[in-house]
Structure formats: C-alpha cells, structure tokens
Image: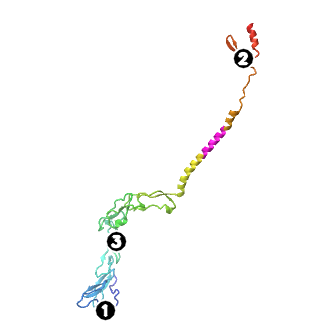
C-alpha cells in the first residue's frame, strides 16, 4: 500500500490554494467549485485522481488526502469516494472467462467461453450456442453484446459451408489476386471455384482443334481411297479383251435327229460311213 498523497492537482502550493478558495466563494454566497473539485463545509476540495480513493477532505490548512486503490479494486474517474469498487469476478462455473484483467482504473471484463453466449443482459451466466447452419456464421460481437442468438446470415461475398457454434462467415476466395478466373460463382454456403485462364482457353481450343483435325483426316483418307481406285478402273475400261480362237472350229450336225459336234475335215468321212 502506497502512503496517502495530498491531491494538489494543478492547484499548486498552499498559498495559491488559499487564494483560489477565496475566489471560489464569499460569505453568504453559494460555493462554486471547479470540475475536479467538490464542496466541503463551505470550501472547495480537490477530488482524487482516477485509481485513487479519498482518505480525508481538505481543511483550512491541508489539501485533500488520497491513496491508491487496493489490489482487486478500481476507481475510473475523479472522485471524492473513500472506497474503490471491487473488480468483477468471472466465475468459471457460470461459463465466464476473463477477457480483460482489471487494474486501478478499469474493471475486469468477462465474457462467455467459446461456443456459449450470455443468458440475459446482465450476463451473469452463459448458455450453449445453437449451431449456426450452413449459410449462417457465428458473430462474436453479437455474443459479446449479450444477444440471444449469435448467428447471422452470411452477407454477399462471404460463405459458411459448415454447421458450427464458433465458425464465422468467411470471405470468398479472390481468383483475381491469384491470377485465376472465376469458374463457379460463390454462394452464402459455398466458396468461389477458380480455374486457370490458360486452361480455360485450352478447353475451348482443344475441341475446335479436334474437329479441324478430324475434318482434315477425312479429306486425306477420301483422297487416298479414290486415288488408289483410279488406275484399276482405267485398266478395266480401256484395256482390250483378247478372245481365244479355236484352230479347229466345232460344227454341229444332226445324228439321228440329235445335234452332234464335229470338227472340220471329218464331215466328209462321217457322211461316207453313214452311206455304207
């Protein structure tokens, strides 16, 4: 504990203090004190600094006496109070944890554990969060503001693809920053899908090239097939046909009413035989 201090503030020495007090009031008139002073028994006494508490008021011979707040207590404003306020205690069994530790000028700040939120505006106890569904994100500020529901729909440009008690909405991936192109636009429940600009161009050029190659191959095959058939067709059309001539022509004669083939030169002999 630090020893008590006399709160002179900006007022200076005792002589100056007496002069000031003389200007503060006159007998029979209302006492008018400055902002960082307070009226006590017809005189203006200095208030204690933030982080201090009053030990004794000023008198005709002494200024206000102040002392720092004891451990675990605070005073956040200029005061004439003789007691500092105790820090809040974040009870673990109620689900509260310390967000900011208190000091001589500020109170301790409590908050609910992750996955829980304040049960009411006093935030003395915490209750479990309901999972935020896909397309909704957990908003820590709403839980800190002691709202009953910390879930909020994901705004345009953000998404949440999980059901969670703690996950916020995340921004869409920026394809442009990665030098890519947007393949599928994002929604409140899904991220953007990016693709390479070169790959996108190839996906257009490859089918066109395939069609062109197929067309050229067809033309070449057609040309080769018809080119191979040309000479054969010409030979069949223009090559003269040679007919074999029998050196001994066969002639047909009637033998007993039936045609009989005879070679030339034998006709006379057969006729002679028939006559015999």
Q: Main secondary structure of the magenta part?
A: helix
Q: Tag 1: Cα neighbours inside 10 Å, few (<14), some, or many (≥20)?
A: few
Does any portion of residue 6 appear in the rendered image? no
Determine whether label 3 and label 1 are within 8 Å by CB.
no
Q: Mark 2, mark 3: which one is toward the viewer?
A: 2
Rounded to the nearest whole Å, what is the CA distance between mark 2 and mark 3?
137 Å
Rounded to the nearest whole Å, what is the CA distance between mark 3 and mark 1?
44 Å
Q: In this view, does 62 lie to the left or right of 243?
A: left
> What residue is rendered at 61% in x and 45% in y?
217
Q: Is mark 1 on a helix, strand or loop?
A: helix
Is residue 49 highlighted in magenta? no
Start-end of magenta stretch: 216-229
Hey, which quadrant is residue 128 in on the image? bottom left
Query: Which of pointers 2 and 1 lies earlier in the amino acid sequence?
Result: 1
| Relative depth, front residue between 58 and 69 | 58
Where in the figure is residue 140, as x and y percent of width and height? 37, 65
Say if 81 sits above or below 222 in the image.
Answer: below
Q: What element carries label 2?
A: strand
Is residue 219 highlighted in magenta? yes
| Relative depth, front residue between 76 and 172 | 172
Where in the figure is residue 127, as x and y percent of width and height? 31, 63
Q: In this view, does 229 lie to the left or right of 17?
A: right
Query: Which of pointers 2 and 3 lies earlier in the amino acid sequence?
Result: 3
Q: Which residue is tagged 3?
A: 109
Q: Which residue is tagged 2?
A: 251
Say if 274 sits above or below 203 in the image.
Answer: above
């Amino acid at each position: 504990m630090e020893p008590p201090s006399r709160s002179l503030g900006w007022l200076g020495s005792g002589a100056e203090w007496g002069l000031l007090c003389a200007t503060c009031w006159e007998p029979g008139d209302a006492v008018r004190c400055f902002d960082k002073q307070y009226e006590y028994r017809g005189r203006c006494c200095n208030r204690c600094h933030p982080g201090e508490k009053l030990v004794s008021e000023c008198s005709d011979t002494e200024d206000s006496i102040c002392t720092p707040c004891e451990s675990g207590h605070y005073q956040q404003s200029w005061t004439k109070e003789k007691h500092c306020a105790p820090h809040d205690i974040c009870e673990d069994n109620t689900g509260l944890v310390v967000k900011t530790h208190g000091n001589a000028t500020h109170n301790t700040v409590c908050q609910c554990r992750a996955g829980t939120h304040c049960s009411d505006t006093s935030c003395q106890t915490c209750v479990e969060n309901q999972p935020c569904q896909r397309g909704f994100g957990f908003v820590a500020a709403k839980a800190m503001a002691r709202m009953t529901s910390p879930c909020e729909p994901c705004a345009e440009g953000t998404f949440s693809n999980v059901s969670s008690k703690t996950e916020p909405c995340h921004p869409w991936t920026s394809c442009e920053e990665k030098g890519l192109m947007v393949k599928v636009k994002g929604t409140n429940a899904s991220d953007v899908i990016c693709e390479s600009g070169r790959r996108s161009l190839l996906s257009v050029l490859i089918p066109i090239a395939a069609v062109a190659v197929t067309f050229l191959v067809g033309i070449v095959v057609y040309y080769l097939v018809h080119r191979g058939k040309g000479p054969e067709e010409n030979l069949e059309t223009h090559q003269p046909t040679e007919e074999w001539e029998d050196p001994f022509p066969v002639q047909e004669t009637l033998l007993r009413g039936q045609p009989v083939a005879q070679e030339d030169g034998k006709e006379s002999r057969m006729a002679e035989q028939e006559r015999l």
